Image: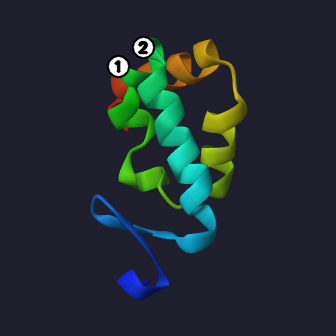
Amino acid sequence: MSKRDGWRVGHSVVAWELALPYSNARLRCLNSPLLHRRMATIMDDAWADDADHLRWVNTAKVAEIVKWAEAIERNGE
């Protein structure tokens, strides 16, 4: 995907249709102390273009997201 086809985020290019869900997920992480501590994992480039992941970050309970992020970090994924 070229820069023209999406929004550049880190080393990735997020499809334009995911720009709003990505922004909302990022804001949710920034506004929650618990999510902010795990933001690097939650918003990793590997998931930047995954619509299901972004929808989950925007709607799941904070505790569920934190538990998932801790497991990812523990397993080095």
Image point 57% across, 24% down: which residue?
Answer: 65
The quarter of the displayed image where residue 74 is located: top left
Query: Which residue is the site of mark 2?
Result: 33
Give how far across and how far down residue 57 sits, in percent.
Answer: 61, 35
Visible residue check, residue 19? yes
Quadrant of the snapshot with the N terminus? bottom left
The x, y position of residue 46, in whole percent, is 42, 54
Position in image of residue 54 (x %, y %): 60, 46
In this view, the residue in front, 66 or 19, is: 19
Number of labels in the image equals 2
**For mark 1, what is the residue?**
37
Depth-wise, is mark 1 or mark 2 nearer the camera?
2
Q: Residues within 10 Å of mark 2 (few under 14, many from 20)?
A: few
Q: Quadrant of residue 43?
A: top left
The amino acid at mark 2 is Pro
Residue at x-position 72% and y-position 32%: 59
Q: Is residue 40 above or below residue 62?
A: below
Label 1's element? loop
The residue under the point 60% across, 17% down is: 62
Cα–Cα span, label 1 and label 2: 6 Å
Which element carries disc 2, helix, strand or loop?
Answer: helix
Callout 1 crowding tier (Cα within 10 Å): few <14, some 14–19, many ≥20: some
Q: Please name whichever residue, 76 or 67, is drawn nearer the observer in this view of the structure.
A: 67
Q: Quadrant of the C terminus?
A: top left
Q: Does residue 2 appear in the picture of this structure? A: no
Compared to 55, does 58 lie above or below? Answer: above
**Label 1–label 2 contact, CB within 8 A:** yes
Expressed as whole percent of the image width and height from the top left, the position of residue 16 reads: 56, 72
